[in-house]
Each structure stands twice: as C-alpha cells, then as structure tokens.
Image (cartoon, rainbow, N blue to C red):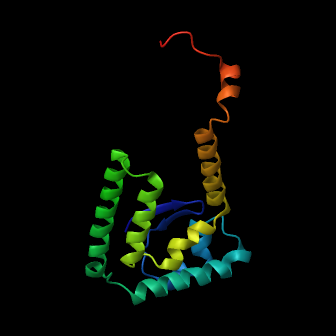
Amino acid sequence: MAMATTPEGEVPWLDYSNDIEYHNSKSFLVDHCPCISSSSFEEFSNQWNRLLEDNAEDDTPNVDGETWEIVYMCMVLLLMFVALVSDRVGADMVMLGALTLCMASEIITIEEGLEGFANEGLLTVLVLFVVAEGISVTGALDWYMGKLLGRPQSIA
C-alpha cells in the first residue's frame, strides 16, 4: 500500500473514489477543498448529493439521439461560414437563418432562441448599427471628417 505524506505525517493511501460517506464528510472537504467553510458545508453537501444521484440515475448517455444533432449543427456552421466568407448575404441574415434552422429542428426551443433578444447589450448594439448605417448613407459626417482629417492631395 502506498503512503501519502500529510502535515500529520505519513498515512496509508486509500482509494475513496466510490465511498460516498467519505465524500460527504467534513474531513473530505478539509483535505481537498480548503476554500469551503463549515457554514457552507451543508449547501455543498446537498449539491454534491444531487450530483451523485443525477449521475447514478443516468449512467448511459443517449448517444444515438444526439448524433444527428451534432451532424446537423456541423452542417449549419459550415453553411454559416461559407455564407459569411462569400459576403453575398448580410451577416444579420446569416445569423438569423442559422437561428431559424436550429429552432426548426428543435435543437433549441423557440423560447431559448428568442431569449437572447431580451438582452439590453444586444439591443444597444442593434440600435448602434441602425444609427451607423443612417450616418453612412446620408453622409452626415463627411464634411466634419474632411475638416478634421483634411483632404488627400494624391491617391497614394
């Protein structure tokens, strides 16, 4: 049996990988997780027990049901990449098309797909795109930028 060195001295190394009582004990937390305080021990223990129960119930993943989703998403990503590189369609339409394909195939639900549009940061960026396009189309900053940067005297 191998020996492990601890602050208390040498102790026999034991394999506690399947010992649930040891994993739920305070000595396991003290030995392996010094950042866990005794006040949060109960919360951590409950989360650990739920994790062990979830893993015990579903030992075999459903690989056959997920294979088509992996292949489908690879194809969607490839189509997105080709469409973005070719620059024939706007990036906004490419992304919305990919989102629609994901929602149509039920890889993500409609609620999950539309949930991202409720983010304030995304809405701010969308508004800035509209403002930037308006300024670009109208040429509103051309005169100011000409005064600020000057007019080039030659092409080079």
Q: Quadrant of the N terminus?
A: bottom left
Q: Quadrant of residue 60?
A: bottom left
Q: Nearer the viewer, residue 94 or 46?
A: 94
Residue nearer the viewer, 100 or 69: 100
Residue at horizontal 57%, vertical 14%?
A: 152
Q: Is residue 2 visible?
A: yes
137 vs 66, left or right, is right
Furthest toward the bottom, the residue is 57
Q: From this viewpoint, is residue 25 visible?
A: no
Seen in the picture, residue 22 relative to 120 is either above or below; the reply is below
The one of 17 and 46 positioned closer to us in this rendering? 46
Report the number of numbered marks: 0
Horizontal side, residue 41 vs residue 12: left or right: right
61 shown above or below 78: below
From the top left corner, tell me how far across and down residue 55 is, in percent.
43, 83
Q: Nearer the viewer, residue 75 or 46?
A: 75
| Residue 117 spot, x, y in % from top left | 59, 67
Q: Residue at x 49, y 78 (%)?
A: 110
Whether residue 130 sits left or right of residue 22 in the image: it is right
Q: Residue at horizontal 46%, vertical 82%? A: 19
Farthest residue to the right: give it.
39
Residue at figure coordinates x 30%, y 57% from the top left: 78
